[in-house]
């Protein structure tokens, strides 16, 4: 809009009004990102109603959708760091010994190949090495790791209809707890 020396009282309303960009509520999320990169806002038509969608709205929803993934990833990284701190260079050997041929879980070649079931069992089997870190809470830690592992599997294998059904408070607690150890 070219204003130059004109006063506001001499600018037409048409000069200040943008063309409305509408999208369907069924639009692919990537299309919505592209549209918001080009427009300040979008109008979504749903049930004969107009709803305004801004980049803030999209980012807020995206954060809500991503939070469980990011919390679970953070917890897993912290568990790996704890294992490496406790066992150092001997970790791979200890994993192989613990999950050998007799064990029902497959033998991980490294901590990066462990599942949450591996983490829970490894902590329980080697509780003497972990006890001082986890304040003598073996059952609580094992159940916490197993519950987070169950949430991880449901989420990462798309067995969740609504990510909001997750116990986000438990994930936040787990992330905070394992980060403080």
Image (cartoon, helix red, strand yellow):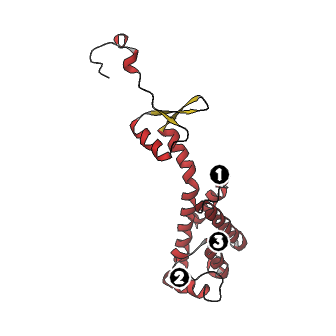
User: Compared to 135, does 129 lie above or below?
Assistant: below
Q: Which one is nearer the viewer's eye here, 137 or 174? A: 174
Which of the marked residues, 2 or 1, is nearer the chain's N terminus?
Answer: 2
Q: Residue furthest right?
A: 139
Query: Mark 2: which secondary structure?
Result: helix
Q: Which residue is mark 1?
A: 162
Residue 137: x %, y % from top left: 70, 71
Q: Is residue 32 above or below residue 79?
A: above
Which of the two residues, 29 or 11, is positioned nearer the viewer here? 29
Q: Quadrant of residue 135?
A: bottom right
- The residues tagged by marks 2 and 1 sit, at their Cα atoms, a distance apart of 37 Å
Q: CA distance from mark 1 to mark 3?
A: 32 Å
Q: Nearer the viewer, residue 132 or 112?
A: 112
Discs 2, 1 touching: Cβ within 8 Å? no
Q: Residue furthest top?
A: 9
Q: Earlier in the sequence, mark 1 or mark 3?
A: 3
Look at the image and tell me in which quarter the C terminus lies.
bottom right
Label 2, on which residue?
91
Say what secondary structure mark 3 lies in. loop
Residue 120 in the image: x percent, y percent?
65, 74
Left or right side of 135 for 95: left
- The residue carrying pointer 1 sits among few (fewer than 14), some (14 to 19) or many (20 or more) residues within 10 Å by Cα, namely few
């Amino acid at each position: 809009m070219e204003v130059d020396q004109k006063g506001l009282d001499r600018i037409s309303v048409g000069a200040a009004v943008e063309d409305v960009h509408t999208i369907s509520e069924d639009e692919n999320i990537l299309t919505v990102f592209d549209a918001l990169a080009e427009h300040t806002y979008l109008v979504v038509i749903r049930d004969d109603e107009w709803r305004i969608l801004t980049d803030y709205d999209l980012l807020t929803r995206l954060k809500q959708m991503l939070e469980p993934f990011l919390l679970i990833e953070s917890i897993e990284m912290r568990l790996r760091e704890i294992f490496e701190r406790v066992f150092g260079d001997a970790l791979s050997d200890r994993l192989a010994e613990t999950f050998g041929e007799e064990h029902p879980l497959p033998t991980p070649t490294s901590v990066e190949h462990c599942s949450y079931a591996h983490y829970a069992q490894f902590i329980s089997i080697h509780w003497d090495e972990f006890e001082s870190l986890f304040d003598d809470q073996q059952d609580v830690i094992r159940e916490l790791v197993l519950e987070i592992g169950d949430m991880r599997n449901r989420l990462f294998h798309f067995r969740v209809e609504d990510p909001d059904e997750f116990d986000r408070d438990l994930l936040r607690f787990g992330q905070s707890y394992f980060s403080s150890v």
